[in-house]
Image (tube, coloured by chain):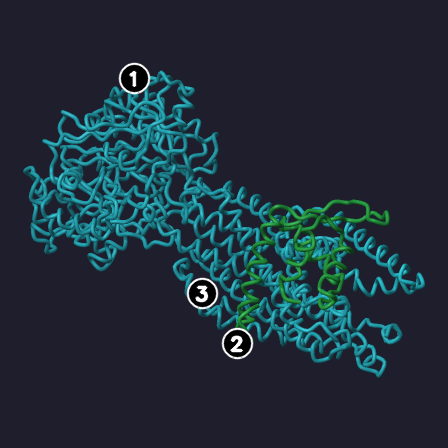
Amino acid sequence: MSWRCFFRRAQWDRERAEELQSYLDIETEENIGRGMSPDEAGRAAHRKLGNMVRIREEIYQMNTVGLLDSLERDLRFALRSMRRNPTFTLAVVLTLALGLGANTAIFAVVDGVLIKPLPYPKPQELVSLKHVAPGIQVDDFLMSATQYFTYREEGRVFQDLGVWLAGGTTITGNGDPEQARMVAVTEGVLRALRIQPAVGRIFTEADTTTAAPGLEVGGGAVILTYGYWQRRFGGDHSVIGRQLIVDSRPAEIVGVMPEGFRFLDMKPQAEVILPIRINRNSVALIGFNLRGLARLKSGVAIAEAHADIARMLPLWLNAWPVPPGNLGRQAIESWRITPALQSLKDEVLGGVGKMLWVLMGTIGIVLLIACANVANLMLVRFDGRRQEFAVRTALGARRGQIAQGVLVEGLVLGLAGGALGVVLAQAGLRVLLATAPDTLPRLGEISLDPRVVAFAIAISFASSMLFVAIPAFKHKSPIGSTARGASASRERQRTRNTLVVVQVALALVLLVSSGLMIRTFVALQSVDPGFADAATLQTARVWIPPQQVPDPERFTRMQHEILDKIASLPGVRAAGFASSVPMEPNRTALSGIWVEGRANADDTTPPARRIKFVSPGYFGAIGTRLVAGRDITWSDIYGRARVAVVSENFARETWGAAAAALGQRIWSPAPSTTPVWRAIVGVVQDVHEDALDQPAPAMVYWPVLMDNFARAALTGTRAINLVIRSDQAGSESLMNPVRNAVWSVNSNMPVFLVRTMKDLYDESMARTSFALVILAIAGAMALGLGLIGVYSVLSYVVSRRAREIGIRLALGAKPAELKRMFVRYGLALTGIGIVVGLAAAAGLTRLMSSLLFGTSPLDPATYVAVLVVLTLAAVLASYVPARRATMVNPMTTLAEE
Amino acid sequence: MLQGTLDMLILQTLVIGPAHGHTIAHAIERGSEDVLQIEHGSLYPALHRLEDRGWIASFWGTSENNRRARYYRLTPAGRKQLAAQTTRWEQVVRAIGRILKPTTEEL
């Protein structure tokens, strides 16, 4: 064969025919010359030559690229038959498009979030230097500057290592003062991430050291992110070398990050990058407020790095000075600080992986159901084409040729469904990305890239194989099946029934899953978060820069004044402030709390508790009930009364009852070791600080201004979160007067992070909501497809048995009885499906137990509800075709035969 | 007829000069003194195959009795192929002959 011939076959064939004809002519002529009659001469010539058509065919075949040729033919045939059966085509393509589209969309999410590596070179080498401190029950223990130095200097497995912290900063010197999101880093962080700046340079060692004592954030140098550079400087390259004022300290712009740079999964992403500047000669052992990040030497496993840190921790503990008044080494040793290193990717994903795989599996099941449906449609269609297959076989088509034709038709349908599915997936993803920005990490990295499209094509192929193989397998011998082959048809009916049973079973699994998710959602909503009516709670953060108002008492009085002004605004029912509001990630601090009269030797530390600094009226405004005692008052604060409020669970755990805590004294040591006891004046209800599905932590609430608390004689709370109860929460009509109230006290104070508690609450529910929505969609699709399955099988049975029904009716069968007969048939199929599905659900839902809250994977109510829904739906799906059966006119049916 | 021998015979026939299918068929039949009876039809696929391999080339011409006919001629590659095949054939024949008639010296 040759390609040249392949494309010129027709012309070739014509020439061959001519050539053979010329042979015949010559031979005939010669035969006549030998004395034959012209007729006889012609016949003899033909005999001599042999079968002309066969010769031509043989040559034609030689010029054929076998598969390609028949493929083209089959393709044409498939397209023609699809056009001729628009209803069938539409049903198949739409069903597949739904299944394939949903899978493509969810794969795009899984790929973008879980599979794609982090957007840094060699991301597998990056680790997050996490620690835990089981001695004081802290499962995310931050690092101190001294740990950073020890690891950097003594570590054996790191290429680069640095520490960072995230927060906000005030930038002046370029128009209006502005509050910007920042991440502060030591030089090792950007080096470890291997980020090349778009303009300028990254930080050097000199940028991240200081002569001032201790550790300071910002000043000296600053790096802009691409977005901030574009927004504030219009992408001007001459910004390098310009001065900005960052938190009242001059800083020179040294570089701009490349477009698309993202610092881990910070939300919202940082706008500027500041240096953490440390004076190595004046840092104390403790001061744990930094997060560590490192790049391992290539080939080093996390376990080795883990061991290396474990080796260095004792070195660290004994290497650094403990200033007088600080906690001693023994105390810190008792905290049992332990490395808990994690790959940076795991840190970024934060446990979302399991949920996504569950969702992917769920949507995969929907595709299986869709394929079963299509297989059923194909079976029906093949039944209709049996005659055609038989004729083709009789005409000499080989079985392989027929099978190939069927396969090609399936592939065409599958790919058409896949193509439409990609379009649907694109639309679905757009909706998903627009509506769920806070649900998933790395959401910005999700897209329909070539890999996702390749996946779509692959699953289109796979499902085509699946839904073609089942009917093709059942049509093994087309010969002779034009006769009403009762046994063959019974077998096909069995296949159809099996498919329906599978569909019902899978649908049940999905319905149970979505049912469990609904239960979880409801259970979460019925959790008392510890605050009331989130929709009418406005929050906003106000920060008083230390350079402007250094004195804690002064700025606390300013905060008091702001609060009074806000409280007197029209429409404001109550107001207060605190160092953080519930459900803000990583905002509450941890601190060891000593209890008077409890045995805690000097060198051991009691469990760390969450602490929060609150203003008088905070509990009232946010709606946290006072269980016993009283709130903190302004006269407590200005009178330096040493008071505290604790949560109910802390009181119960320590003293057995809420009221028993009143009058008891507690103390938080850092940094002085001389006890400064503070009396508990109030006990408030438990608050779910972290998330609704996390247990409410034991809390201690301190007043916003205290003496002898931290290193200073007086400690205030510079960054406060206003909590304002108003029906206008979430609107500018509330926030404008609030801002004016703040600025009337001091016009240099930024007001930022303006949110309602509802926003935070919804964010906390976001992951569950996301899973719920996806599962609900999957469940609805499964139910719909399953019902279509039951319906179509029964319709088919009814149409096949129309003659029998006609006879029965003619012989006096009651329509109601006939109806019951068919409904019973549908219910029997559903029943088997339900039994199989129940077993499968009991096994499979265990996989999703980590997504559940307040309900067991075997929740009886869910199972019962699903059973009822499925059964009712099956009755309906069987009733419609059954009713059609009884409307058969016996005379017409019999006459048709 | 043995696989490949028809090819060789066709090539051999064309050594004398170009010929069309009818001539080739009859030439083979006559040359073998009618021992090798071939179905003339089977000649054409073989011709096509040889042409495809580049051993012969074809052109349209006029036959002795003034009819349009497709002529084939040997190409240099075909000539080389014929030589190779002939040598090989003779070796095979000699070998078989020796096995069948071990006493006979000649042949």
The chain letter corresponding to cyan is A
Dot 1 corresponds to which residue? A241
Q: Are marks 3 and 2 in contact (CB under 8 Å)?
A: no
In front of the other: label 3 or label 2?
A: 2
Q: Give the mark, 1 or 3, whose residue is nearer the N terminus.
A: 1
Task: Indicate the chain on which mark 2 is placed.
Answer: B
- Colour assignment, chain B: green
Q: Are marks 3 and 2 on the same chain?
A: no
Give the amino acid at mark 2.
Answer: Thr
Dot 3 corresponds to which residue? A845
Q: CA distance from mark 1 to mark 3?
A: 59 Å
Q: Is residue A484 visible?
A: yes
- Report the side of A346 relative to A13 (left or right): left
Give the amino acid at mark 3.
Answer: Thr
Q: Quadrant of the C terminus of chain A?
A: bottom right
Please, what secondary structure does the residue beneath circle 2 have? loop
Q: CA distance from mark 3 to mark 2?
A: 88 Å
Please, what secondary structure does the residue beneath circle 3 have? helix
